[in-house]
Image (cartoon, rainbow, N blue to C red):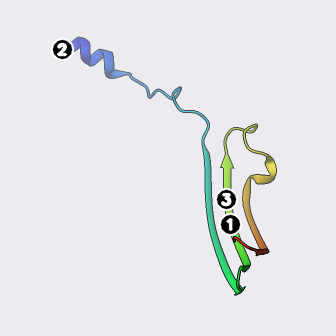
Amino acid sequence: MKDIYYAYKDRKPLNFLYGPLRKEKIVELKILYEPLYNVYLQGKYQYSEISDEESDRTPSFMLGQKNSFSVSLSYGLP
């Protein structure tokens, strides 16, 4: 039993199995309104927060806190 105690006594956590971390949080609100038959007006708001430990994976313009808003008008399918 003493051999097992000494084998695990100075054991350190293994970090080589974990890659660089990427965190992505997105909240989106979408509103669709049909003022006339088959005519759609859509508004969309999106908040995103992206962080990445690997510098080459995510373009720099996508990192950080971003707000976006869009309005669209369509005919036929929304």
Residue at 33% across, 22% down: 9
Q: Position of residue 57 (x, y in %)?
A: 72, 39
The reply, left or right, for residue 25 in relation to residue 8 is right
Q: Tell me the quarter of the picture where residue 25 sits.
A: bottom right
Q: Position of residue 75 (x, y in %)?
A: 77, 75
Q: Residues within 10 Å of mark 2 (few under 14, many from 20)?
A: few
**Foreground: 73 or 71?**
73
Residue at 78% across, 72% down: 70
Residue at 74% across, 39% down: 55
Q: Tell me the quarter of the picture where residue 26 sits.
A: bottom right
Work out whether 21 lies above or below 17: below
Q: Judge depth for marks 2 and 3 and give the one in front.
A: 3
- Which labelled disc corresponds to residue 49? 3
The reply, left or right, for residue 60 in relation to residue 24 is right
Work out whether 55 lies above or below 78: above
Tell me which amino acid carries mark 2.
Answer: Met
Q: Residues within 10 Å of mark 1 (few under 14, many from 20)?
A: some
Q: In which quadrant of the rendered image does the C terminus lie?
A: bottom right
**Foreground: 11 or 44?**
44
- Which labelled disc corresponds to residue 1? 2
Q: In which quadrant of the rendered image does the N terminus lie?
A: top left
Residue at 25% across, 11% down: 3
Q: Earlier in the sequence, mark 1 or mark 2?
A: 2
